[in-house]
Amino acid sequence: MPPQKRILRSLQDIRTLSGKVDLTASPYMAYMKVSCLEMEKFRRGKEKTSALRRVENINIRFKEIEAEKAGILKTLDEKKHVPSVSSSSSEPSPSFPPSEGGFKLRY
């Protein structure tokens, strides 16, 4: 009978069950996972209420802007229908040359 060859084994060849543990095998891991999910749910709820509050503030500001815009347009419309006192004066109104394309800035 020929002598058997000796096979060298290392740590990688040792079989274990460490990577195959179920959550049901260790209940404390399942409870830990549930508690982590609950904490994340709580944080997301806080984020949601904060975001909804910000959206509400933006909507309020939109209404304020529309009210202010309507007031300005109403004032302009009233001034358009009222005859101007300065138009009957003897002073000529200053006239500006027509602009060609807006502002021109040099740097």
Image (cartoon, rainbow, N blue to C red):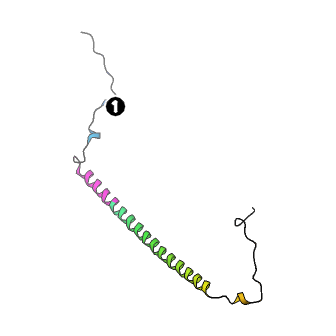
Disc 1 residue crowd, few under 14, some 14–19, many 20+, Cα 10 Å: few
User: Where is 67 relative to 30, above or below?
Assistant: below
User: Where is 29 relative to 39, above or below?
Assistant: above
**Three-letter code for the amino acid on which mark 1 is drawn:** Gln
Query: Where does label 1 land, which residue?
Result: 12
**Relative to 80, 91 lies left or right:** right
Q: Does the segment drawn in magenta span residue 66?
A: no
Residue 62 rendering spot, x and y as whole percentages: 48, 73
**Within the image, what quadrant is residue 20 found in?**
top left
Which residue is depicted at the point 28% across and 33% down?
15
Q: Main secondary structure of the magenta part?
A: helix
Which residue is depicted at the point 36% across and 62% down?
44
Which element is circle 1 on? Answer: helix
State the residue lying farthest toward the right. Answer: 91
From the image, which quarter does the C terminus lie in? bottom right
**Within the image, what quadrant is residue 43 found in?**
bottom left
- Which segment did they paint magenta? 24-40
